[in-house]
Image (cartoon, grey):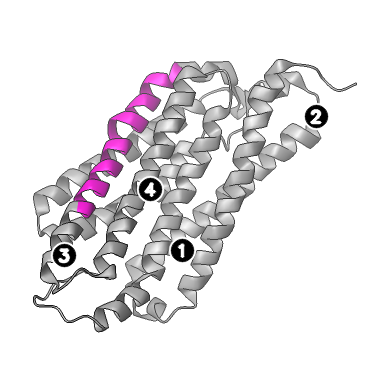
Amino acid sequence: MPVSNPGINLILGPTILGVIINMFLFGIVFMQAVTYYTSSRYQKDSWAIKGLVSWVLLLDTFHSCAVIWVVWEYCINHFGDLVFLGTTPWPFPTTPIFSACASVPIQIFLAWRVKLLSNSWPVFGVLLALSVGSGIMAFITGIRAVQALNVFLPVQDFATLIPVVDSWCDGLSVVCDLSLTLLLFLYLRRSRTGFASPTPVITRLTLQSIETASFSACLVLDLITFTSLPNTNFHFAFALVAGRMYNNTLLTTLNGRDKIREDLDGINTTTSVSLHL
């Protein structure tokens, strides 16, 4: 007889949904990485950019394999085990750590682009502080989540982490992402004045800057579901997606540079504007 328990839908259902969405996005990230490694720009990039791409791809691969293992544990090794269903294996509580390991370097990368566009060290310093601060809070969240016997934390005990998760998601990370989006948008819109006529180059770069707001959307939804539904796994679906969104935007930005360069070559500008691509 199948186990009849309304908690299964609220715990196992969001978990499987989150893993499915995560694997779909991981496939996109992987293809973007293949495109980057086989492009002509790969050989021209600095070791820092190459290392960043390799780092986020390694993180994505390891964490995606880990969350698949969680589904295997829930659905195969412990099928019908309500006691195990009420606990959370380590890949989920450590999701903030994995997300921070990917998001902080990418946020710093975007903050550096803002610095190049604005030529302002104070602005870069503020963005850097927000990014590092959010990373520290993410590590605190993950460490506190796994401080339990046998590396398992009952689902209902996640409610004790609400204050620190609120600080990570709402207080720092969202502010950092929204600041990056707003500053990139403003400085790129200002760069339009350097062209004789409106160009698809600045429009494309502006749209890329707006994409960073998708990080904040995932984090806000994670925050809402975690705070309002602490006894479920709904927040995992958004937490898993956030890390993949960061990595996909980074790779999309890097892979789109050749097209932007081609557009720039065909544009006559009245003023030399450095886009720092």
Of the two numbered discs 3 and 4 on the same chain, state the one appearing first in sequence.
Answer: 4
Of the two numbered discs 2 and 3 on the same chain, state the one appearing first in sequence.
Answer: 2
Left or right of residue 183: residue 221: right
Which amino acid type corresponds to the residue marked 2 in the rendered image?
Phe
Residue 201 percent across, percent down from the top left: 27, 69
- Residue designated by label 1: 54
Which range is magenta?
160-185
Of the two numbered discs 4 and 1 on the same chain, state the one appearing first in sequence.
Answer: 1
Dot 4 falls on a residue whose secondary structure is: helix
Of the two numbered discs 3 and 1 on the same chain, state the one appearing first in sequence.
Answer: 1
- Residue designated by label 3: 192
Q: Residue 135 is drawn in which quadrant?
A: top left
Real-space Cα distance between discs 2 and 1?
36 Å
Residue 21 percent across, percent down from the top left: 59, 45
Name the residue nearer the viewer: 192 or 46.
192
Q: Residue furthest right?
A: 1
Dot 2 falls on a residue whose secondary structure is: loop
Nearer to us: label 3 or label 4: 3
Marks 3/4 in contact by CB < 8 Å: the verdict is no
Nearer to us: label 2 or label 3: 3
